[in-house]
Amino acid sequence: MTAGIRAVEERDVDAVVGLVHELAEYERAAEHCLLRAEQLRSALFGPVPALFGHIAELDGRVVGCALWFLNFSTWRGVHGLYVN
């Protein structure tokens, strides 16, 4: 059994979208989850990515993910990090 965490790669997009939809289903909000693979691919791997992510793998299968992006508070003058 091999397990690990690594940066998300383009080949992981469909699996990550699936996990997001599974979470929405679990939260009883599936009808609100509109994420599509093309959207996530563009956000993660487009010319100027503003979204980043990591995945958890078990035996070569994506079993978890964390998507994150930076923000900046102009009032406080500090960066923040949102993790989904």
Image: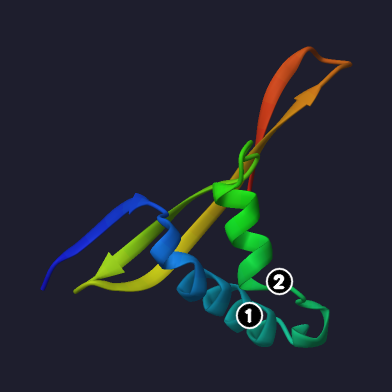
**Neighbour tally class for label 2: few under 14, some 14-19, many 20 plus, Cα within 10 Å:** few
| Amino acid bearing label 1 | His
Contact between marks 2 and 1 (CB within 8 A): the answer is: yes
Q: Quadrant of residue 27?
A: bottom right
Give the alpha-carbon distance from disc 2 to disc 1, as whole Å. 8 Å
Q: Does the image show residue 84?
A: no
In the rendered structure, the answer to whether residue 36 lies left or right of residue 9 reads right
Q: Residue at x 82, y 79 (%)?
A: 32
In the rendered structure, the answer to whether residue 37 lies left or right of residue 9 reads right
Asked if residue 29 is positioned above or below residue 75 in the image, the reply reads below
Closest to the observer, 74 or 60? 60
Q: Which label is found at residue 41?
A: none
Q: Quadrant of the C terminus?
A: bottom right
| Amino acid bearing label 2 | Leu
Residue indicated by mark 1: 21
Q: Which label is found at residue 35?
A: 2
